[in-house]
Amino acid sequence: MIGRNWFFSYSESLQILFNNKKNLFLTLSIFITVAIAYPIILPHIHHPSMIYHIIVHIIILETALFLTFISIHSYKKTRSKKVLFTALSFGVLLTVGFLFLLETSDILGEFHIPYIDVELPHILLMFMLIFFAIGVLRVESK
């Protein structure tokens, strides 16, 4: 008879996945690549320069997703406001990466803010830097 030690519950499996950063990065990368292969990669498969540009943005998206997951997990463990602002900055970077990927693959056009004539990803990058600076420079009181 097989004991309970051979089987993991769903939460235990996720905990094991989160604790091994290599497995987490690999799992997130495979998930993102499979999810966007048909709508984003396949229409541009015969345009080598375009596909390389899209691959760069996919790598940015996967890295930002990994950093967001890791920082949220760290925040849940520490409850530190520094880590919270860092997690927010990586979340904004993830949004910017996704917008740039959509813009690069010609799914959506440029995201201009009308009256100030600035693209939305540039504004979001500014907020990402602000959140990151607050997270790095904030002094924790004990």
Image: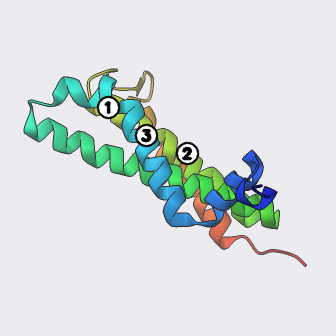
Residue contact between numbered discs 3 and 1, judged by CB atoms under 8 Å? no
User: In which quadrant of the rendered image does the N terminus lie?
Assistant: bottom right
Residue type beneath disc 1: Ala
Residue density around tag 3, few if under 14, some if 14–19, many if 20 or more, within 10 Å:
some
Query: Count of labels shown?
Result: 3
The residue at the point 49 percent across, 48 percent down is: 28
Structural distance between the alpha carbons of marks 3 and 2: 17 Å
Residue positioned 73% across, 53% down in the render: 8
Q: Residue at x 32, y 44 (%)?
A: 57
Dot placed on the residue nearer the N-terminal end, 3 or 1: 3
Query: Which residue is identified by label 2?
Result: 92
Tell me where residue 133 sits by quadrant: bottom right
Disc sitting over residue 32 in the figure: 3
* Residue 122 visible in the picture: no
| Nearest-to-viewer mark from 3 and 2 | 3
Task: Give amino acid for label 2.
Answer: Val
Outermost residue on the bottom side: it is: 142
Q: Helix, strand, or loop for circle 1?
A: helix
Name the residue carrying label 1.
37
Q: In which quadrant will I find the C terminus?
A: bottom right
From the viewer's perspective, is residue 115 above or below residue 1? above
Of 3 and 109, nearer the camera is 3
Point out residue 33 in the picture as x, y percentages from the top left corner: 37, 40
Q: Is residue 62 above or below residue 34?
A: below
Label 3 element class: helix
Q: Position of residue 132 (x, y in %)?
A: 59, 61
As measured in the structure, the alpha-carbon distance from the residue carrying label 2 to the one carrying label 1 is: 23 Å
Furthest-front residue in this view: 1
Q: Is residue 52 left or right of residue 118?
A: left
Residues at circles 2 and 1 in contact by the CB criterion of under 8 Å: no
